[in-house]
Structures are given as C-alpha cells and as structure tokens.
C-alpha cells in the first residue's frame, strides 16, 4: 500500500489494532513510517482518550475493526442479541457481528407496557387485528398477545439477517396440542406478512410436552428453539427428536450449583453451567445430532468483575445469545480469545453412549428429570417467571377490549 497517496481502510484497521497490542516500531518498516505516522498518532490518541464509560454506540463502532473479542467470538460462534429493544438491535446489527435475535415473554411484555409510541403502535395493531378475527374476548386477548409478538419479531427482522425467536404462551408448556396450534398460528401470521417460516424459531419450554410438540412442528418445516434447558435430559430428548436449536441457561445452572454447594467462586472450566453446555455440545457432535446448542443466560464464574467468564469458556459453541451489556464488554476487550469448543475435537472428548438406545421415551425422560434437582427446580422457576410476565401483559391488553 505504500505507493498510494492514502492508506486503505484495511491498513488503517491494522494500524489501530497494532497500536493497542504492541509498540508500533516493532512492526513498521522504516521506509513506511512517514506514511503511517499521522495514523499512528491518531490511533495512540484514541487509545488514551477513550472515556471511562464509553457509550454503547462508541463501543460498537470500534468493534468494526475486527480486533475486539466480540469480533473474535463472532468468527467462531454465530451470535444473537438477547433483547426486545429495537434501537439496540438496530445499532448492534451495524457491527456485522450479530445475525440473530431472541425474545421472550418478558421482552414482549416490556414492549407492550413501555408507553413508547413505537411499541404502542404494535399493541394497537395487535388489538385491532384480534378484534377483527373474533368476538370472544378471551380468544381475542390470546390472539392479540401472539400478534404483538409477531409485530415485534417482524420489526426485528428488518435488522438481523438470521433467525428471530418468538415464544408460544408459556402457560401452554404442558399442553402439546395447544402449543402446536398456537405455533402454527404464529407462523401463519408471519407468512401473511411476507416473512418465510425459515426465518422464525418457535420458542417452547423444554418440557416433555414442549419437546414432542416441537418434534411435530419440525416435521412440518416449522423450526423450533427449546428454551429453559438446564440439563442433559432435556438436551438429549430434544436432539433425538430433531429439534433445530436448544437454549441451555448457563448462568442459571451455575446459580443452582453455587447455592447447592455453598461455593461462591468457581474457575470457569469448573462452572457447572459451562460443564453442562460443553457436555451437550460434545454429545451432539459425537452422535451426529444436528441440533444447535445456543447457550444463554450468563453469570461471572469467579464473581463480580468476571462477567465474561462463561462466554469465554464456551467460545466456539454453535451459537450464543448474549444481552447488549455483555456484548459491549466483549467489544471493549482486544485480548486474544481462545477457542474452547470445536466440533471434531468435541466429538472425540465425549465418552457417553447414546441415551435410551437413540430415542428416550417419556418414562425415562420424566425419571431422569426427577433425579436432576437443578433442571427440575430451575425449569419450574423459569416457567413461573415467564407466566407472570405474560399475565401482566394480558391484563394490559384485556383493558383494551
């Protein structure tokens, strides 16, 4: 590039990275120095002038250089943002590192109750849509809640190029037939808006009913994200029934074991959330399951100040969904990020045979679930929390009928 009047963007990127990682004189030939000196001065100035608490926009703009841990992670793991905040999703999508988005009843409820004009319009349209479809108030409220989730998902899809996850009413977590019906209704609404079903992941709780509902939906080309996964019993049952993706809650698994053992500080490699997610990943690779493992929910293994422990310990997982604050923290670090999970090596490290002869039945599933205190307690807790959020939203929407 030295024969050009001005350096290329790629060269500028390299200089910015070098200025942070090492003395530039160690890398830049003497003959090239005159051309680069102004850039080096600017880069060093940027390095030392960074504000103590950078704004989200500033942090994300720096990630475009490709030297951040966010960029490094995105090179080995497909990343989703875990939020329903459209402004945040739009901003993050510009980095090129975020391809998917996940929502849940909390995010939909927050959107519906926010009072923000953008979200108010989604609610008003959902209510109008439902009133035009049924005269029954209870049916109308349920339809409006689903429609609101679709409105939010449709808007998100303007910013991400991959999947958006839309959750079925969590109160149906133990009703297979109604879960299937509601999932099909959600997909139909998306398709009426011109959105192909291949862009949507239907979110269901990983109960036995949710898993078997997903099995039926997958056969019809409706891909699913089984959420509230806390252990191998759920993960294996999902994989054996052809579920597209699971969301194990790394941090909540850690919470349970931390309380159970009375141990506050863990090495990331010993964090039980990391251990379980690694085990799932390795099992899937060994036995040829195509189910995607997408860890969610994060905690600092070693306590405050180590918020990225679990994410870094699972670098290389198929996918991850990460909230905006942790994405920003990854963006602010330029330290090398080691890949911890790799498919071929993971398959070799798994020593487990296929559970249930390749297809675990309901009795075995329920027994194994009962024996797993973490999964049993955390799944129940998670469903209750999602139901609570849904009921708050339902109350607000019902007042409009």
Image (cartoon, rainbow, N blue to C red):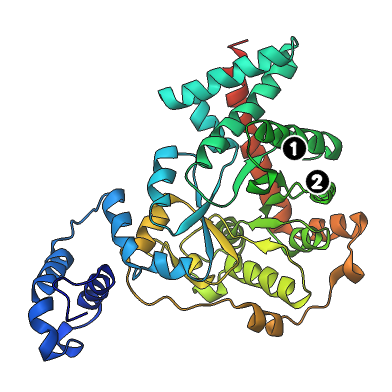
Residue 135, placed above or below residue 367? above
Residue 69 position in % (x across, y down) = 39, 68
Q: In the rendered image, which quarter is residue 51 located in?
A: bottom left
Nearer to the camera, 255 or 71: 71
**Picture residue at 33% right of the left edge, 62% below the top:** 63
Q: CA distance from mark 1 to mark 2?
A: 8 Å
Residue 28 position in % (x across, y down) = 17, 86
Give the number of callouts: 2
**In the shown orientation, is residue 55 left or right of residue 110?**
left
Location of mark 2 (residue): 217
- Disc ID at residue 183: 1
**Considering only order in the chain, which callout, 2 or 1, is on the residue closer to the N terminus?**
1
Residue 142 position in % (x across, y down) = 70, 23
Nearer to the camera, 384 or 71: 71
**In the shown orientation, is residue 366 left or right of residue 332?**
right
**Picture residue at 66% right of the left edge, 82% below the top:** 344
Residue 389 in view here: no
Residue 298, placed above or below residue 336? above
Classify 10 Å Cα crowding around label 2: few (below 14), some (14-19), many (20 and above).
many
Q: In the rendered image, which quarter is residue 251 located in?
A: bottom right
Check if mark 1's residue and mark 2's residue have beta carbons within 8 Å. Answer: yes
Label 1 secondary element = helix
Nearer to the camera, 312 or 65: 65
- Disc ID at residue 172: none
Query: The N terminus appears in which quarter of the rendering?
Result: bottom left
Q: In the rendered image, which quarter is residue 257 located in?
A: bottom right
Residue 365, placed above or below residue 353? above
Nearer to the camera, 372 or 350: 350
**Picture residue at 73% right of the left edge, 66% below the top:** 290
Residue 108 position in % (x across, y down) = 55, 33
């Amino acid at each position: 590039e030295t024969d050009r009047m001005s350096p290329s963007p790629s060269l500028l990127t390299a200089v910015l990275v070098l200025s942070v990682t090492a003395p530039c004189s160690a890398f830049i030939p003497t003959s090239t120095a005159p051309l680069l000196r102004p850039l080096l001065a600017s880069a060093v100035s940027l390095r030392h002038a960074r504000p103590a608490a950078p704004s989200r926009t500033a942090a994300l703009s720096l990630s475009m250089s490709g030297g951040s841990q966010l960029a490094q992670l995105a090179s080995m793991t497909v990343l989703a943002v875990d939020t329903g905040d459209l402004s945040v999703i739009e901003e993050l999508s510009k980095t090129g590192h975020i391809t998917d988005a996940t929502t849940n009843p909390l995010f939909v409820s927050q959107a519906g109750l926010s009072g923000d004009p953008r979200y108010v319009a989604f609610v008003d349209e959902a209510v109008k849509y439902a009133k035009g479809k049924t005269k029954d108030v209870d049916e109308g409220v349920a339809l409006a809640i689903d429609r609101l989730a679709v409105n939010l998902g449709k808007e998100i899809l303007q910013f991400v190029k991959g999947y958006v996850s839309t959750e079925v009413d969590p109160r149906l977590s133990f009703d297979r037939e109604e879960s299937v019906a509601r999932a099909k209704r959600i997909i139909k609404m998306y398709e009426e808006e011109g959105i192909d079903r291949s862009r949507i992941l239907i979110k269901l709780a990983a109960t036995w009913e949710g898993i078997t509902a997903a099995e039926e939906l997958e056969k019809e080309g409706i891909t699913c994200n089984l959420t509230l996964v806390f252990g191998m019993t759920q993960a294996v049952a999902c994989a054996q029934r052809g579920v597209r993706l699971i969301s194990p809650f790394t941090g909540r698994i850690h919470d349970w074991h931390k309380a159970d053992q009375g141990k506050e500080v863990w090495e990331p490699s010993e964090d039980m959330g990391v251990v379980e997610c690694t085990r799932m990943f390795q099992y899937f690779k060994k036995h040829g399951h195509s189910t995607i493992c997408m860890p969610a929910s994060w905690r600092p293994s070693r306590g405050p100040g180590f918020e990225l422990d679990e994410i870094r310990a699972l670098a290389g997982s198929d996918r991850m969904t990460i909230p905006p604050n942790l994405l920003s923290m990854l963006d602010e670090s330029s330290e090398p990020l080691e890949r911890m999970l790799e498919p071929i090596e993971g398959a070799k490290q798994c020593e487990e045979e296929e559970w249930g002869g390749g297809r675990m039945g309901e009795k075995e599933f329920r027994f194994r679930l009962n024996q797993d205190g973490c999964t049993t307690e955390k799944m129940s807790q998670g469903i209750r929390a999602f139901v609570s959020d849904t009921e708050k939203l339902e109350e607000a929407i019902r007042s409009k009928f």
